[in-house]
Amino acid sequence: MLPLLVASSAVGIWVGRKFIWPQTPEQIRAKEMKARRKQRQSQPIELIREYVMADEPVILATEEVPLDNRFGNRVLISELEFSRTATISLNLGNSQGMSSTFHNSLIKLVQSWSSAHMSRSLGMQVGSQINRSIRLRLSCDPGKMAMYRVLWKQESRRGVLEMRIRNKTYEIPYTMTYGLSHSLESLDYVVERGPDENIEDEVVDLGE
């Protein structure tokens, strides 16, 4: 039985019964490029870079709370509880040339890939919901009326994902809305009781 390596020379080697010529630098580079193309084909989407254009808060909802203490002789204290649910969402815009060349299945793949990328980037799952409850202690001076406003907010990030999709490069704008916070405003809505103010109360008989 012949050994695996029989002979060698300056230009090649014998392996078994096959003579192998050494590869030139051009052949090595061509082989590497072919391997990279094959890898890109197995992974049709590749992120090149992400551009963050703006991070800013957006108002999700508002709740106004009036406190009427015009006929009271002491400070009115009210403890109220509020709750709100928000969804973490990602919306993709259209890149030039995408709508005419992309199939629906590929658009869904881009949406799924982008959602997974943004979930990892911000540490929160796209499509999940946030539930939050708060308890506030509000007050109003005697003889006055006050108005408060609860603002529920989320963060909005606008940017661009530069992606290579099936060997073509696209810039896809996106808007991601995430998080949930609140703030409290006093609207300075103060109505003092007038000396000649005549108030008629409506009495409703609920029966027994």
Image (cartoon, grey):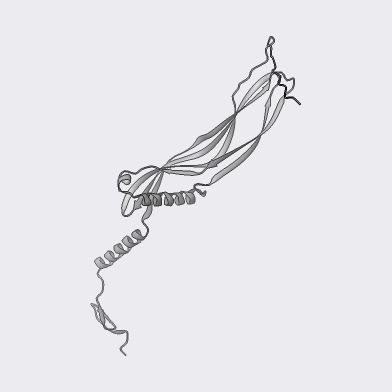
Q: Is residue 116 left or right of residue 132?
A: left
**How many discs mark residues in the rendered view?**
0
| Residue 120 at x, y percent in the picture | 48, 51
Please tell me which residue is depicted at 24% across the width and 66% down the height of the picture: 26
Quarter-of-image position of residue 69: top right
Picture layout, residue 67 above or below residue 157: above
Q: Is residue 72 left or right of residue 188?
A: right
Q: Is residue 158 left or right of residue 4?
A: right
Picture layout, residue 148 above or below residue 125: above
* Furthest residue toward right: 208
Please tell me which residue is depicted at 68% across the width and 15% down the height of the picture: 193
Please tell me which residue is depicted at 29% across the width and 62% down the height of the picture: 33
Q: Is residue 3 left or right of residue 198?
A: left
| Residue 207 at x, y percent in the picture | 74, 24
Quadrant containing the N terminus is: bottom left
* Furthest residue toward top: 196
| Residue 153 at x, y percent in the picture | 54, 36
* Furthest residue toward left: 11
* Furthest residue toward bottom: 1
Quadrant containing the C terminus is: top right
| Residue 160 at x, y percent in the picture | 39, 44
Quarter-of-image position of residue 54: top left
Please tell me which residue is depicted at 62% across the width and 39% down the height of the picture: 133
